[in-house]
């Protein structure tokens, strides 16, 4: 593997050379993705990012394909099951809002490992469930693992240039989301039948969740040591060397919330990732009840929805990048709109399909556009306000879980068909919101125009210019940078600093005046 020289030699960096081409004008971010490479820092972070999120899904939805068995064992109603489904995604909303600022301040590595380890504990306690209330409470805390999506997306945004961020973010997000489909098969069609060989069905579902819990704990502890926060190394080391300013997490979050584009993307992500989470909870039960299938068979069919993440989310981000090369941000937004509109139409067709074979086929198409819309959303996120990308990624990510809660309430209160109609209408309506997204320095679908730098960047990209010759797109907002940069004169150890932040009220820090 060839070694490529990094940016300015005078900067204090952990690595003097990289295994990928980088752009020194974008903090040594990679301008290419080498999928078969695991070299630090860029590709190691890439693979750690998607794998951690994959394991988070394994923990998060371990019980989902077994819910018909849980319902029968505990004598639960449909409403009680859906209450637990809602709780499983509601717990993630709060942490997704918090994780964005934490990533801006501490980097993605430490929050990722800490939350994976934490979520493994309630997952291992699944066998103690004895009522609807205990099931809902347990799933609420297990759902914290789903917030690792923020670190997943922030990590690749720190490692890869914005010109390929759509592809990078979509690949790691999609391969991570693939855990939802794999979990349906592994838990519902492999481990559950295997455990039933030596015990009753109730004993099997109470015991089998120990497996994902152990995997999640091991992954969470390992991630602290095997990767880096960004191309130059870990945030704490960079702050000690004076190569990175201390960041105010509260200022970062405040700046992100004041941008209307953040909230428009929040709604759109609610109507794609929120739909995926709802289907992860509902698909197995839907196929079992509608077509009178066994738990094992319905779980295997439901897994197909998640398996589309293997390629569909990546394609969504890739097409977004290509559209950016042809039309700039306007191209990204047009593709985003198309994905959402087609997704909504597919929901309407799916819910009116009576044949099992055709229902599976339509679900595959439906799922493909759900994942593509997710990938295209995070092709836009890095452009909204670069200095606070972590906070924006967190808020938009929380939109997915908020959507899942809202759709879950719909399925809880309504019959299946009206619930699907409600979902379809919301999705189609969210696609129209692309018309109102207007990012500073970039042309929207209906308004705005590209700045000279943005215009030059995407035209060069579309013409096939070398990736390492790209300009910064867009230039960081000077005011926003001042808002989130502070001088804290040193820092504590990574983990202690992280734990102090989440457990204590932090004092106000002075803004950097240098």
Image (cartoon, rainbow, N blue to C red):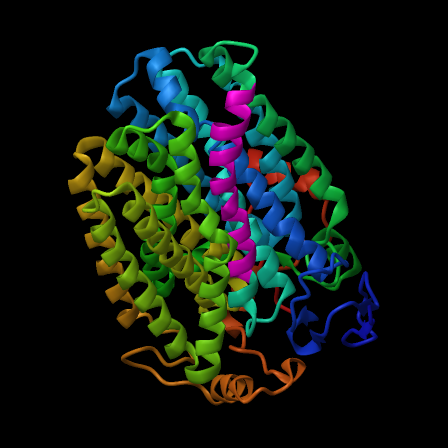
Q: Does the magenta segment cover residue 174? A: yes
Q: Is 413 on the left or on the right of 339, as rendered? A: left
Residue visible at 48% across and 76% down in the picture: 322
Would residue 207 be seen by someone viewing this image from the given angle? no
Q: Quadrant of residue 11?
A: bottom right
- Residue 74 point in image, percent of width and height: 35, 12
Would residue 28 be seen by someone viewing this image from the given angle? yes
- Residue 82 point in image, percent of width and height: 30, 29
> Is the residue 154 above or below the residue 216 in the image?
below
Quadrant position of the N terminus in the picture: bottom right
Residue visible at 42% across and 25% down in the picture: 66
Q: Which stretch is magenta?
A: 169-194
Q: Is 197 on the left or on the right of 254, as rendered? A: right
> Is the residue 240 above or below the residue 259 in the image?
above
- Residue 305 point in image, percent of width and height: 40, 46
Q: Is 9 on the left or on the right of 485, as rendered? A: right
Which secondary structure is most common in the magenta stretch?
helix
Q: Depth check: 95 or 76 in front?
A: 76
Q: Depth check: 318 or 363 in front?
A: 363
Q: Does the magenta segment cover residue 190? A: yes
> Is the residue 223 above or below the residue 289 in the image?
below
Residue visible at 82% across and 63% down in the picture: 15
- Residue 176 point in image, percent of width and height: 54, 48
Residue visible at 46% across and 13% down in the picture: 201
């Amino acid at each position: 593997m060839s070694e490529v020289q990094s940016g300015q030699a005078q900067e204090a960096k952990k690595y003097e050379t990289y295994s990928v081409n980088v752009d020194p004008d974008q903090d040594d971010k990679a301008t290419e993705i080498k999928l078969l490479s695991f070299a630090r820092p860029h590709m190691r972070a890439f693979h750690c990012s998607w794998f951690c999120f994959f394991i988070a899904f394994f923990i998060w939805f371990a019980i989902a394909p077994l819910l018909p068995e849980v319902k029968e064992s505990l004598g639960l109603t449909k409403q009680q099951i859906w209450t637990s489904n809602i709780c499983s995604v509601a717990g993630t909303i709060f942490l997704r809002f918090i994780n964005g600022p934490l990533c801006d301040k501490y980097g993605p590595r430490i929050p990722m490992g800490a939350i994976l380890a934490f979520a493994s504990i309630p997952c291992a306690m699944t066998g103690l469930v004895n009522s609807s209330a205990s099931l809902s409470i347990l799933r609420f805390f297990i759902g914290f693992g789903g917030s690792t999506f923020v670190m997943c997306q922030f990590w690749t945004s720190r490692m890869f240039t914005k010109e390929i961020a759509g592809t990078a973010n979509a690949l790691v997000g999609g391969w991570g989301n693939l855990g939802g489909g794999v979990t349906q098969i592994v838990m519902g069609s492999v481990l559950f039948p295997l455990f039933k060989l030596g015990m009753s069905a109730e004993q099997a579902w109470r015991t089998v969740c120990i497996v994902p819990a152990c995997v999640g704990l091991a992954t969470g502890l390992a991630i602290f040591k095997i990767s880096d926060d960004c191309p130059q190394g870990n945030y704490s080391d960079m702050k000690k060397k004076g190569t990175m300013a201390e960041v105010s997490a509260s200022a970062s979050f405040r700046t992100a919330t004041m941008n209307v584009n953040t909230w428009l993307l929040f709604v759109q992500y609610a109507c794609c990732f929120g739909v995926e989470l709802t289907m992860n909870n509902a698909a197995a039960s839907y196929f079992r009840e509608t077509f009178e299938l066994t738990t094992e068979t319905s779980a295997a069919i439901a897994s197909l929805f998640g398996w589309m993440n293997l390629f569909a989310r990546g394609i969504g981000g890739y097409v977004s990048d290509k559209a950016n090369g042809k039309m700039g941000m306007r191209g990204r937004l047009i593709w985003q709109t198309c994905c959402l509109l087609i997704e909504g139409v597919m929901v309407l067709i799916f819910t009116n399909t009576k044949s099992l074979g055709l229902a599976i086929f339509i679900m595959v198409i439906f799922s493909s556009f759900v994942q593509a819309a997710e990938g295209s959303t995070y092709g836009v996120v890095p452009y909204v306000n670069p200095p606070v990308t972590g906070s924006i990624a967190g808020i938009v990510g929380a939109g997915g879980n908020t959507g899942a809660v809202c759709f879950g309430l719909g399925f809880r209160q309504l019959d299946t068909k009206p619930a699907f109609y409600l979902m379809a209408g919301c999705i189609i309506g969210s696609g129209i919101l692309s018309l109102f997204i207007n990012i500073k320095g970039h042309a929207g679908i209906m308004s705005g125009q590209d700045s000279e730098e943005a215009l030059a960047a995407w035209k060069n990209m579309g013409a096939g210019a070398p990736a390492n010759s790209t300009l910064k797109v867009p230039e960081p907002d000077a005011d926003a940078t001042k808002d989130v940069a502070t001088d804290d004169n040193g820092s504590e150890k990574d983990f202690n600093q992280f734990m102090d932040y989440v457990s204590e009220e932090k004092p106000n820090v002075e803004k950097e005046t240098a």
